[in-house]
Amino acid sequence: MKNLVTANQSHIEDAFEKINKVARFLKRNDFNEFAVVGSSALLVCGFPLNRNVGDIDIEVICSHKREQVFKALADAYGNNFYEAREEYPEVAGSTHKPYIFEIAGVKVNVWCVKEFTHSMLVEARGIRFSTLMSTLCRKMAYKRKKDSRDALSFASTLIEIVSR
C-alpha cells in the first residue's frame, strides 16, 4: 500500500479549490445544473486513490444549443476528442466523449447530458457530487484499467481497515 495516495484533508481542500474555480465559471455562465463525477468525486468522498487526479469530470444538464459553449471552449483549447464516438456504454443522452478544455488552469472534461447519469448525488459546499458507490459502479461499467485499479485500491483499503 506504499503507492496509495490517501485522501487526507489537504488533498480534499486542493480538489475543492480546483472544483470551485470550475463551479464559479459554470454558474457565471448560467450552467447551474451540474455534478462533479469521476475521480474528483471519489477524492472529495475521502476515497484513497492509487494515482493523482489530473482533471475534473463534470456532467452538465443543458440543451444542445447551450452545449455549443463547451464545444467552442474545446475547439479553442485545440481538442476535438468529443467528435469520437463513445466506446463506453451510452450515458443518458450523451453520444460523444467529453468536451475537454481548461478553466483557470484546471483541466475539465464536460459531458452534456439530458439527466444526470448517477442515481445518487450528494451536495457538499454548494456543489453536487456523485456518491462513492455510484461513482465506483459507473467506473466499473467502463472497464478501463485505471478504474479497475481504483476499485482494487478501495477493496484493499477496506480489507486493511477490517483487519486492524
Image (cartoon, rainbow, N blue to C red):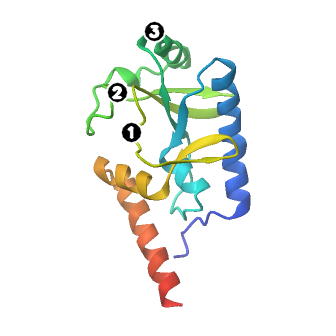
Residue position for label 3? 65
Q: Position of residue 28 (x, y in %)?
A: 69, 20
Which quadrant would the C terminus be assigned to in this image? bottom right
- Of circles 1 and 2, the one toward us is 1
Residue 30 occupies which quadrant of the picture? top right
Kind of residue indicated by mark 3:
Lys
The structure residue drawn at horizontal position 48% and vertical position 11%, both measured from the top left corner, is 68
Sort mark 3 into few (<14), some (14-19) or many (20+) by Cα contacts within 10 Å: few
- 2 and 3 marks in contact (CB < 8 Å): no
Residue position for label 2? 94
The structure residue drawn at horizontal position 47% and vertical position 16%, both measured from the top left corner, is 67
The answer to whether residue 143 shows anywhere in this view is no
Q: Is residue 111 left or right of residue 30?
A: left
Determine whether 157 is above or below 38 in the image. Answer: below
The structure residue drawn at horizontal position 68% and vertical position 41%, both measured from the top left corner, is 126
- 1 and 2 marks in contact (CB < 8 Å): yes
Kind of residue indicated by mark 1:
Thr
What SS does tag 2 mark? loop
Residue position for label 1? 117
Q: Residue furthest top?
A: 65
